[in-house]
Image: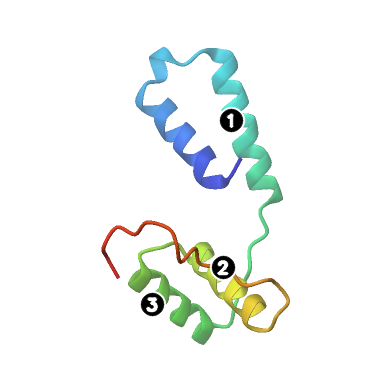
Amino acid sequence: MTSTDTAALLDDAANRIADVSRADLQIMLRRAALRLRNAAAVSMDEDVEEVLRDLASEFEVTRNDMIRYIVREWLETNTYLPVHEIDEDGDVDGTA
């Protein structure tokens, strides 16, 4: 389960707290606690942080998502990871 899924579950539970069973709430809180315990903060120099904030804002993503994107792109560009293949025969929605 991704952190986005966990956050969505917690948001949903908060919106309907009276309807969530104690057991389900316990599971969600334990998952959230586990994620927080295992989360490793990546600290950068201030100039890098500023660029990350600007890029994240421009792409409308979180700072961590931006870091993930940059690392993946770097790994693919330098052939440490296979490049995502584009399905050229697939349907498109008409946007570029």
Q: Disc 3 and disc 2: Cα gap in Å?
A: 29 Å
Q: Is residue 49 left or right of residue 41?
A: left
Q: N-terminal of the two: label 2 or label 1?
A: 1
Residue farthest front in this picture? 89
Residue farthest right in this picture? 80
Q: Disc 1 and disc 3: Cα gap in Å?
A: 32 Å
Residue 54's disc number? 3
Q: Quadrant of residue 94?
A: bottom left
Q: Quadrant of residue 75?
A: bottom right
Looking at numbered disc 1 in the image, what kind of residue is underneath it? Leu
Q: N-terminal of the two: label 3 or label 2?
A: 3
Write the residue at 51% across / 13% down: 21
Residue 29's disc number? 1
Task: Find residue 30 and report its horizontal and vertical position in percent.
Answer: 64, 31
- Give yes or no for contact between labels 3 and 2 (Cβ–Cβ under 8 Å): no
Residue under pointer 2: 85
Judge the density around disc 2: few (<14), some (14-19), many (≥20) Cα neighbours within 10 Å.
few
Q: Nearer the viewer, mark 3 or mark 2?
A: 2
Looking at numbered disc 2 in the image, what kind of residue is underneath it? Glu
Looking at numbered disc 3 in the image, what kind of residue is underneath it? Asp
Q: Quadrant of residue 91?
A: bottom left
- Element marked by disc 1: helix
Q: N-terminal of the two: label 1 or label 3?
A: 1
Q: From the viewer's perspective, is residue 10 above or below residue 64? A: above
Q: Nearer the viewer, mark 2 or mark 1?
A: 2
Q: Is residue 87 left or right of residue 95?
A: right
Task: Find residue 19 and report its horizontal and vertical position in percent.
Answer: 41, 13
Q: Is residue 56 left or right of residue 36?
A: left
